[in-house]
Image: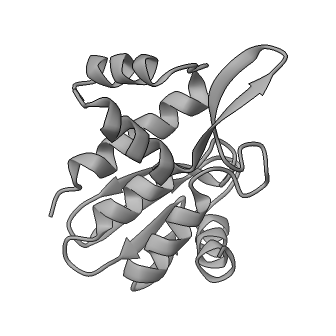
Amino acid sequence: MPPSQSTVRRAILRRLLESKTIASQQQLREQLAERGHHVAQTTISRDLDAVGARKVRDSSGTRYQLAGRGRDTGAGLHDAAKRMRLFVLSIEASGNLVVIKTPPGSAHSVAVALDATAPGAIPELLGTIAGDDTMFVAARPPFDGEALAARLGSIMETVP
């Protein structure tokens, strides 16, 4: 089963908030529209709430920021842990890869959550490729599959 439009849109929204200074919901609407997601302001509000974003004011002005940004766990790590607990059946390392098995139709959901974590939240993670019930997760050098598998298992067990 493919991911829902809201799952994909929220992953894009997280990346936008991590990489750009976004001061308004209108800016977000425009950025999402450029990426093929034409949504109403009410949808933006719901999405901001769902990803844990809040409006902050500092010396550089007002902008949206993901809750927990800058903390060790990073934005999105809690969502990744939750999805892993729900769907991951097994985690096995092989060389610089990790193979994750899920029930049919669930691999993509876990992959999207892992890819949406804040940069540096999982330093061992380079990227994911998901099929229907199997994911390949590549380890970022100098880490190997064993280190990445251990980290993913730890996230699944310890992150609330």
Q: Name the residue at the right extreme.
A: 59
| Residue 157 higher or lower than 59, as above or below | below
**In the image as oriented, which residue stretches furthest toward the front?**
42
State the image coordinates of residue 109 (x, y, percent, origin top left): 33, 62
Image: 23 above or below 154 = above
Q: Residue at x 31, y 67 (%)?
A: 107
Quarter holding the N terminus? bottom left
Q: Left or right of 132: which side holds 90? A: right
Colour style of the rendered protein structure: one colour
How many numbered marks does the figure carry?
A: 0
- Displayed quadrant of residue 119: top right
Q: Residue at x 45, y 57 (%)?
A: 113
65 vs 142, nearest the viewer: 65
- Taking depth in this image into account, of 120 and 17 the one nearest to the observer is 17
Residue positioned 61% across, 64% down in the render: 148
- Along the horizontal axis of the image, is 78 left or right of 41? right
Left or right: 95 with respect to 55? left
Q: Quadrant of residue 59?
A: top right
- Front-lying residue, 65 or 142: 65
Q: Position of residue 62 (x, y in %)?
A: 68, 20
Q: Is residue 101 above or below residue 58?
A: below
Which image quadrant: the C terminus?
Answer: bottom right
**38 with respect to 119 (left or right):** left
Residue found at x 27% / y 21%: 33
Using the rendered view, name the quadrant where residue 153 is placed.
bottom right
